[in-house]
Amino acid sequence: MSENTKTKAYGITNRTDTYVVYELTDSATDSKVTVCPQRGGIVLGCRLNGEELLYLDRDTFIDPAANIRGGIPVLFPICGQLQGGAYEWEGQTYRMRNHGVARTAAWEVVNAYADEDEAALTLELHSNEETLASYPFEFELHFTYRLKAGKLYIEQSYNNLSERDMPVQAGFHPYFISADKQLTYISDATKVLDYNDGQVKPFEGTFDLGSLVESVALLDPKTPEISFPSPSGRKIKLSYSDVFGVVVLWSVEGKPFVCVEPWTALNEALNRKEGLILVPPGDSLDADFTIETEA
């Protein structure tokens, strides 16, 4: 693959910024998506139609021992935390860090191109000795990041290479720039689980994350999409496959971001054995996630 391949409006380049990062560009819409395969296949930046959408704490990015706070971390095979950092499966106990094994792993670039229609980058992650110690399943993940017409598309394939059903809880953890913690979210969800007190409450569209320590989760959206305002007043719209049946909202006091996170199941899914997707041997779970902005 060449260092710099451009066709018409679309381009893709790679450069070193502590790690090798790839930049997908769309000059016609002033859009750019930055991805770091070595740091969990993470999207570090996403500028769509001239507006940067993602928060990034750069110190956590350049520190190889730190979990990156910012961008769009990939969550697999769990989203959230496990009580005591452990879970039981088929009579054996395993330990796993928050949000799973994919976000701290080095992914491999298998394809990168730009043509007259789009710029795209495909990454793979294979199970290895380290992942198997936490998650005893042979797997292969294929993610393609596409920048097309000012939108970011993330196509996912979670492949089970084991000889038994593979339990999957997948998701994303986007950090969106926002100094305002009280946003209005357009969703047809009617209920929210507040992890701060464990109560299920009516969801009325607006939620103030500023005073909360823990997250909240929209429980029952019928339409797989949610939108909310950007700092410029545009609407950020997230749309995703039906398997993402939960949307988690979270922030940290004093930090200019809100996280709007599509998950396939609620926290502690591996321990609760609820909401897990069991991928048969030799099969895959395929899903999509799209981010766009609207005037």
Image: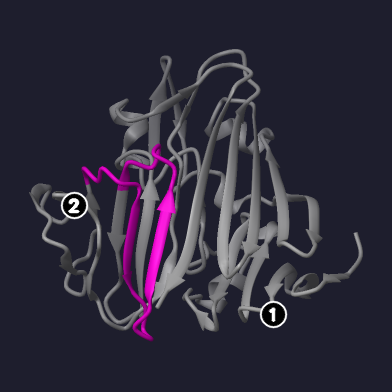
Render colour scheme: one colour
* Residue at the (32%, 30%) spot, across then down: 275
Give residue 24's position: percent from left, percent from top.
70, 69
* Residue at the (12%, 48%) spot, across then down: 198
In the rendered view of the protein, which quadrant contains the C terminus?
bottom left
* Residue at the (33%, 38%) spot, across then down: 265
Q: Relative to 24, is 223 on the left or the right? A: left
Q: Which of 197 and 216 is in front in this view?
A: 216
Judge whether 250 appears above or below 200 on screen: below
Give residue 163's position: percent from left, percent from top.
61, 13
Q: Do the residues labelled 2 and 1 touch (CB within 8 Å)?
A: no
Q: Specify few, some or many for label 2: CA neighbours under 10 Å numbering under 14, 14-19, or 20 or more.
A: some
Q: Is residue 222 magenta?
A: yes
C-alpha gap between disc 2 and disc 1: 42 Å
Label 2 or label 1, whichever lies nearer to me, is 1
Q: Is residue 215 magenta?
A: no
Picture disc at residue 156: none
In the rendered view of the protein, which quadrant contains the N terminus?
bottom right
Give residue 206's position: percent from left, percent from top.
16, 67
* Residue at the (73%, 67%) spot, across then down: 22
Residue type, mark 2 in image:
Tyr
Q: Relative to 20, is 54 on the left or the right? A: left
Marked residue nearer the N-terminal end (2 or 1): 1
Helix or strand or loop: what does disc 2 sit on? loop
Give residue 135's position: percent from left, percent from top.
53, 31
Residue under pointer 1: 27
Helix or strand or loop: what does disc 1 sit on? loop
Q: Relative to 225, is 72 on the left or the right? A: right
Residue under pointer 2: 195
Magenta stretch bounds: 219-246
Residue type, mark 1 in image:
Ser
Judge whether 281 appears above or below 198 on screen: above
